[in-house]
Image (tube, grey):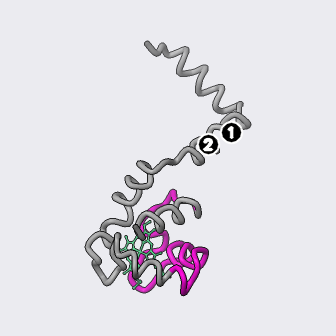
């Protein structure tokens, strides 16, 4: 059971242990696995890329995705998502995604 003292001392530790907090957040970032990517996809990108709404390239249309990756390269595609396109809002509705997350999401959609 959590007592108030436990919660206080944990908060205190988080506040003063910025080094530990940094370490913790980097562990959390690198531990993103396939399931997290699927969840992020469903929460952010699926709205358009599942159905092809607004002419978004559909998830699973690997021919189109492969062609786009060849034409533009992965870094350019990541930048497109970050800065947005004509029909795609900047960030693709994911406010917490890192470049690495976008790369994984694009690879996930291309399969
Ligand atoms: C509101 C709809 C919408 C959402 C949400 C959305 N997209 Fe898109 N996306 C589009 C559309 C439409 C295009 C086609 C280009 C255009 O017309 O803007 C596109 C194009 C792209 C491209 C190709 C970029 C290029 O340079 O050609 C990538 C990569 C991409 N989306 C990734 C994502 C990722 C990753 C997410 C989720 C984090 C996402 N999109 C969320 C609508 C969306």
Secondary structure at badge 2 equals helix
47 within the magenta span: no
Secondary structure at badge 1 equals helix
Crowdedness near tag 1: few (<14), some (14–19) or many (≥20) residues, C-alpha within 10 Å:
few
Whether residue 74 sits left or right of residue 39 in the image: it is right
Percent position (x, y) of residue 90? 48, 74
Q: Provide the major secondary structure of the magenta segment.
A: helix
State which quarter of the image contains the C terminus.
Answer: bottom left
The picture quadrant where one finds residue 70 is bottom right
| Residue denoted by label 1 | 23
91 within the magenta span: yes
Q: Nearer the viewer, residue 8 or 109?
A: 109
**Residue at horizontal 50%, vertical 74%?**
81
Question: What residue occupies the far right of the structure in this picture?
Answer: 19
Query: Which label belongs to residue 11?
Result: none
Q: Nearer the viewer, residue 101 or 19?
A: 101
For marks 1 and 2, give the CA distance: 6 Å
**Residue at horizontal 58%, vertical 48%?**
29
Q: Which residues are magenta?
A: 69-98
Whether residue 74 sits left or right of residue 60 in the image: it is right
Q: Nearer the viewer, residue 9 or 58?
A: 58
73 shown above or below 17? below
Q: Are marks 1 and 2 in contact (CB under 8 Å)?
A: yes
Task: Specify whether tag 2 is near ligand 1 (CB below 8 Å).
Answer: no
State which quarter of the image contains the N terminus.
Answer: top left
Percent position (x, y) of residue 91? 49, 69
**Residue at horizontal 57%, vertical 74%?**
74
Percent position (x, y) of residue 73? 58, 79
48 shown above or below 104? below
Query: Which label belongs to residue 25?
Result: 2
């Amino acid at each position: 059971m959590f007592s108030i003292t436990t919660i206080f001392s944990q908060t205190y530790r988080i506040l003063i242990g910025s080094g530990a907090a940094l370490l913790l957040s980097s562990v959390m970032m690198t531990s993103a696995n396939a399931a997290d990517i699927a969840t992020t996809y469903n929460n952010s990108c699926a709205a358009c890329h599942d159905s092809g709404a607004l002419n978004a390239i559909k998830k699973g249309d690997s021919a189109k995705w492969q062609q786009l990756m060849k034409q533009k390269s992965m870094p350019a595609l990541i930048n497109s998502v970050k800065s947005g396109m004509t029909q795609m809002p900047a960030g693709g509705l994911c406010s917490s995604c890192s470049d690495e997350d976008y790369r994984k999401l694009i690879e996930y959609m291309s399969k």
